[in-house]
Image (cartoon, rainbow, N blue to C red):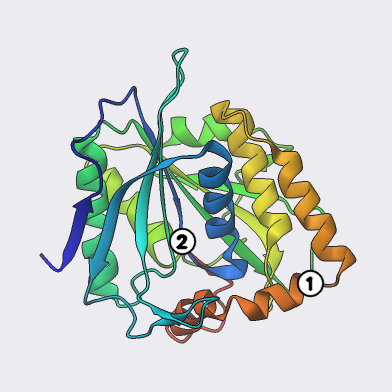
Amino acid sequence: MSWNFTLTQKSLPKLRKPILIEGLPGIGNVGKIAADFIIDNLKAAKLYDIFSYDLPNSVFVNEENIIELPTIEIFVKRFKGGKNDILILTGDVQPTEEHSSYEFSDRVVDIAKELGVVQIITLGGIGLPENPQEPHVFCTGNDKAAVSQFANGAQVKSDLYNVVGPIIGVTGILLGLAQRKGVPGVCLLAETFGHPAYLGVRGSRALVNVLNKKLRLGLKVKDLDKEIKDMESEGMLEQAGKKSASLKKVQTLTETKMKKETNYIG
């Protein structure tokens, strides 16, 4: 198999009804930003390093001017008090070829089942022609009960039909394959500005807010609020988007595969 999942801990932990959250690069990188924030805020521990020759053929230059291969990782956070444990899948890139995206997602579902995952939540963005100040979050999924658990009409809407085109990439395929293997899941999509140089922090905040309330994660969302205010005061939202060019490469590659009327990338 071309995807190598390397366990970074001595053994697989025993988890309590874990939920897997996926946040990989896409429109505005809202899913990745949300996933990274959750990892940092919860101080989650790395569980898997993931590598493949099917990843995009590029390296990134870090702040020390040293090149780095793209990475995809799975983190874990265990809770006390009967709450679901959390797994978070994120990375610099996601597979861009159809076969590779299916193969990767299929392997993730198998690992999720091995770890006893009871639900998968994928995160992404809906690109809009203008920058929304109060982004809405939409919900779809592979199981009606799972969707109804998140959709509440006000904070999370479930009327996605005719709102977006096909959900492309791991964000969509992961749920489709999970359905075939009996793992329920939902996809949370936040509105964001569809400009390729824009960093969708507000959309990410909307996703974090929903997850924090539904999963009782205990996240310090005010930390993200402060970051948004700091970036806005310095006019850095667009600049930050340009600086994260390493994340935009996959977005650009994926966009070339999409039909003109499609307005969403996983």
Q: Amino acid at mark 2?
A: Leu
Give the quadrant of the N terminus: bottom left
Q: Is residue 34 visible?
A: yes
Q: Secondary structure at mark 2?
A: loop
Q: Amino acid at mark 1?
A: Met
Q: Tell whether label 2 touches label 1 (CB within 8 Å).
A: no
Q: Residue 203: x and y, percent?
A: 68, 56
* Quarter assignment of residue 28: bottom right
Q: Secondary structure at mark 1?
A: loop
How far apart in space, not on screen, are marks 1 and 2 (Cα)?
Answer: 22 Å
Q: Residue 212: x and y, percent?
A: 61, 34
What residue sits 61% from the left and 28% below the top? 218
Mark 1 neighbour class, 10 Å CA radius: few under 14, some 14 to 19, many 20 or more = some
**Closer to the camera, 232 or 144?**
232
Query: In the drawing, does residue 266 fall left or right of residue 217?
Result: left
Q: Which residue is mark 1?
A: 236
Q: Residue 170: x and y, percent?
A: 38, 61
Q: Which residue is mark 2?
A: 24
Q: Is residue 264 above or below residue 35?
A: below
Q: Is residue 60 above or below residue 208?
A: below
What residue sits 36% from the left and 61% below the top? 72
Q: Is residue 32 above or below residue 37?
A: below
What residue sits 47% from the left and 12% below the top? 81
* Quarter assignment of residue 5: bottom left
Query: In the drawing, does residue 181 fall left or right of residue 37?
Result: left
Query: In the drawing, does residue 93 fall left or right of residue 204?
Result: left
